[in-house]
Amino acid sequence: MEKEYQYHIFSPYRVCPLGAHVDHQHGLVTGFAINKGVDLWFNVNGSSQCETLNVKGEKWPENHVHLESKTFEGVVDFEIDQPSQVREHHWGDYARGAKYALRKRFELKRGITGVIQGSLPVGGLSSSAAVLIAYVMAFAKANDITLQPFEVVKIASEAEREYIGLNNGLLDQACIALGKKDGLLFLDCDSDDWRIIKRNPDMPEFEIGIFFSGLTRSLVNSDYNLRVYECKTAAWNMLAYQEQPLKTFDKTFLRDVPKETFEKTRDIMPSRFARRAEHFYSEYRRVRQGVTAWETGNLQLFGKLSFASCESSIHNYECGSPELIAIYEIMRSLPGVYGGRFSGAGFKGACIALVDPAYKQEIEKNLTEKYLEQFPEYEKTFQVFWVKPDNGARFEM
């Protein structure tokens, strides 16, 4: 593959051990890029260095984008210098979304010819964000646009919100673009301040287990967007009960409402909204505690907080399918698991766990047996993967 194409981008998947479901409310989050992800190989159309021919043996026009996938069927073709049309509900929408967000800022003249491939068939690792970041970086490269990593984060996030239709925050894109293999990303989604907290030398070794339930998902069609609206409604409730000015819905975030206001209003607002707010404020506290635990090398406490995050996701945020909850309860009981939670939005997909590498085989064996006892219908699709933290999205040599 490398011999056929000028450029190769690796855009990793991500995991978030603490900071669940709060980025869209401008909360605090943590995360890792991992050593599995999306590969995009491509040539720049109109480049004299390397040309790719179409099926007729002709050169692609300079403004054309032609993409193939080793993961999904079909091909994608469009012009980079034309406005994005409505979504086609096809894997090519992510490339069109990247073009949409970039064209708001830059003039795009040159397209690419490329092939994309994902390395894990698993939901919950933000593969959509990884794909978007790869396309943003590729289109920028083709058009001689220099982007700082956080600019890539913002552009990819905007593409997912405005074109794909998922009301996400910056967590996924930030982990993917900014992650470092020797540290934990800590991001404030209100100020956009971030830093990499290097591993404490006293911290024990760990690997990340990804336990795929066998049940796939689509966030746009799940309750993900509904939960975002519920969080905003909780904020509106609190402000209204306290006779505080209201902002428009799109500018309303739980982060802007003090916890003291929540304590005064939690018993008079509808319980559904109170639970969403309780998750936000308790997760804010857990992330603060988790950052201190990470800085001091206390992986046991960090893992315990990750488990507590998942408990709140189940009971306060109310996400999690029976399959994911079963995996979570099983892994809590296994020796060698420091902590873990649902990965991603937590409606289907996978669970992640930080584990002692010495227990990997035992964990995989016991978890697989116990899960399939409850859900034998997933015998052919349940999978366990082991990954490690990695650096963020990059051009590979």
Image (cartoon, grey):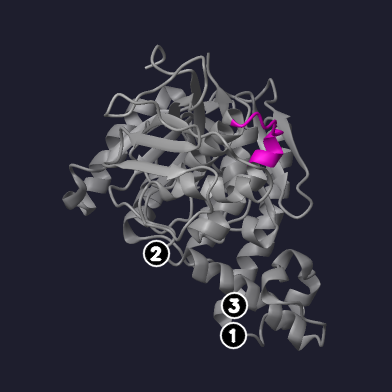
Q: Nearer the viewer, mark 2 or mark 3?
A: 2
The residue nearer to you, when weighing 356 against 380, is 380
Q: Is residue 374 left or right of residue 164?
A: left
Q: Of the two numbered discs 1 and 2 on the same chain, state the one appearing first in sequence.
A: 2
Could you tell me residue 384's position as x and y percent? 33, 35
Q: Residue furthest right?
A: 244
Could you tell me residue 374's position as x and y percent? 22, 53
- Distance from disc 2 to disc 3, alpha carbons, whole Å, reads 21 Å
**Are circles 1 and 3 on residues that touch, CB within 8 Å?**
yes
Q: What's the residue type where badge 1 is placed?
A: Pro
What residue is disc 2 on?
Answer: 221
Q: Is residue 21 left or right of residue 371?
A: right
Q: Is residue 108 left or right of residue 329?
A: right
The residue nearer to you, when weighing 39 against 369, is 39
Quadrant of residue 363 within the rendered picture: top left
Q: Residue at position x 35%, y 52% from top?
A: 90
In the figure, 104 relative to 386: above or below?
Answer: below
Q: What's the residue type where badge 2 is placed?
A: Asn
Q: Residue at position x 80%, y 72% from top?
A: 260
Q: Does the magenta run of residues contain 146? A: yes
Check disc 3 and report its element: helix, strand or loop. Answer: helix
Q: Residue at position x 50%, y 71% from top?
A: 226
The residue nearer to you, when weighing 201 against 158, is 158
Q: What's the residue type where badge 3 is placed?
A: Phe
- Distance from disc 1 to disc 3, alpha carbons, whole Å, reads 6 Å
Q: Residue at position x 71%, y 44% from top?
A: 187
Could you tell me residue 45's position as x and y percent? 48, 28
What residue is disc 3 on?
Answer: 273
What residue is disc 1 on?
Answer: 270
Q: Which residues are magenta?
A: 143-152
Q: Is residue 143 left or right of residue 42?
A: right
Could you tell me residue 271's position as x and y percent? 57, 81
